[in-house]
Image: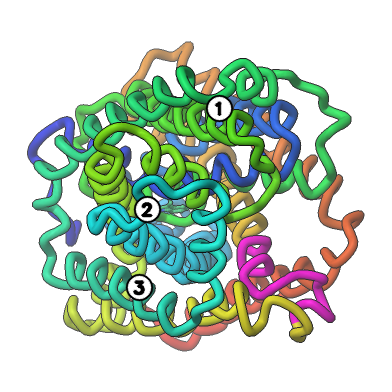
Amino acid sequence: MSTHNVWTHKGTFLLAAVGSAVGLGNLWRFPYLTGENGGGAFILIYALTIFAVGIPILIAETMLGRASRRSPIMGMRFLTRCHNTSRAWESIGWLGAASAFMILSFYSVIAGWAIHYTWQMLTGSLVGADAEMIGEGFDALLAAPGLLTFYHTLFIVASGLIVGMGVHKGIESGLRIIMPALFAILLVVLVYGIANGDFAAAASFLFTFNIADLSLEGWLAAMGQSFFTLSLGMGAIMAYGAYMNSEVSLTRTAIAIAIVDTSVAMVAGLAIFSLVFGAGLSPGQGPGLMFVTLPLAFAEMPFGALVGGVFFILVLGAAISSSISLIEPVAAYLVERFDMTRPQAVALMVVASWALGLLTVASFNIWAEGTLFHALAGRSPFEFIELLTNIFMPLGGLLIALFAGWALTHSEVMKEMRTSETWFMIWRFLVRFVAPAAVSFVFLRTIPQVEGYLIPTIGALVIVGAFAAGRTFLADGHQEG
Ligand code: TRP
């Protein structure tokens, strides 16, 4: 018996999934990682994993949600029981909850930077500023842990209120405006970049593939980013799939999500790198990339304060529609499993993630170096959390692919997919062989070889193992209804 309602409108899943997928991952993370990892080669791996691994797993994850009509953890438990498979598959749900909690912690801090720039734009404080002033302004923001914490708190509380009050389903009409408007304004920035920046340099940086340029860590980052940007491998899509109308085609929906998401990232990348090369900035400057290049364009363009203000408001809209999809699966689980009220469940998730987010805040100032994280893993706490999510999301995706491809019965899946035999066979081949092989290949190639990876890898394995063991153990003592 299902505990979920179904969205009545057929397009709602698509809209919600696009709202989840399009966010800081496209606008902030994609350009900065591409710049750090040398451009084209990074994009090649990213694009390959989106299409050969991401789309099939997106289909699988949506299907698991729709077939179970429950929150991810309870849904996985339900499916393992219906299909008589091992309860260890429930670790997919737990792994997802752990990823959501970690991603939200830094996502909210970065969204806080966008709050700062919305304010700066609307007050006109950056009008006419040059690259140096904008760079100094950004450094000053990072050097102020109190201010960063203030913005981080604002963002996470706003996201929590939306999910806690259950109004996120009503956000649909907002998204219908925010998403196209964001895309339109990105095109305006791109046109400005073509006219005033160096578009040719940007295009050659982004689309000249030299695989030798890509470090081993770059491989993992590219794969991690393809999961991150599609909101994949942690149950967000599963949670939304639980509300999806049974008639809608999974294949077509997944392809549409991937195309929209990739287009936003590409336009953002081309716009940002045109400006970067035009202004002689460094493409590899790290997480600040978007926040120092775009304000520079807005400082110079006509009506820049207004255009920039609207732009950052839309960025915040896109970020909120992503962050609610990080909170929703965990909150839904706490409600279903522990009979918490919705506000209690959301508060628990948000407070815990907020506290973890303080590590990210500190990573840009007081703990930028010399911490335990640097000693053990050679990176700041923020970089360490990002690294863990780059491992957890593909790992979750790998398990989802294996579960959907091997553990579920052919006829069940075929029925749920509602597609032709040919498409079904192609999809099944991709989730059975291609996706697991690709993810394992990148893991085996990168994880053991890069300095400082040993500890995070062992850590990740211990956490996953503990979750799986803990669940199996609890399951024996504590039979649920
Ligand atoms: N995809 C979002 C972005 O690109 C981030 C996000 C939202 C996410 N929900 C997720 C990432 C779930 C991984 C898993 O901004």
As displayed, is residue 188 above or below residue 349?
A: above
In contact (CB < 8 Å): disc 3 and disc 2:
no
> Looking at the picture, does residue 95 appear above or below residue 236?
below
Q: Residue at x 65, y 25 (%)?
A: 206
Residue sitting at x 12%, y 70%:
165
Asked where in the image residue 160 lies, by quadrant, the reply is bottom left
Amino acid bearing label 2: Leu
Which secondary structure dominates the residues rendered in magenta?
helix
- Residue 385, position in %: x, y? 62, 68
Answer whether residue 174 is visible to the viewer in this image: yes
Q: What element does badge 3 sit on?
A: helix
157 relative position to 74: left or right: left
Q: Is residue 384 magenta?
A: yes
SS under mark 2: loop
Provide the residue designation for mark 3: 151
Which residue in the protein does label 1 denote?
A: 274
Mark number, residue 77:
none
Give amino acid for label 3: Tyr
Could you tell me the amino acid type at mark 1? Ser
Which stretch appears magenta?
373-388
Among the two numbered marks 3 and 2 on one chain, the one whose residue lies closer to the N terminus? 2
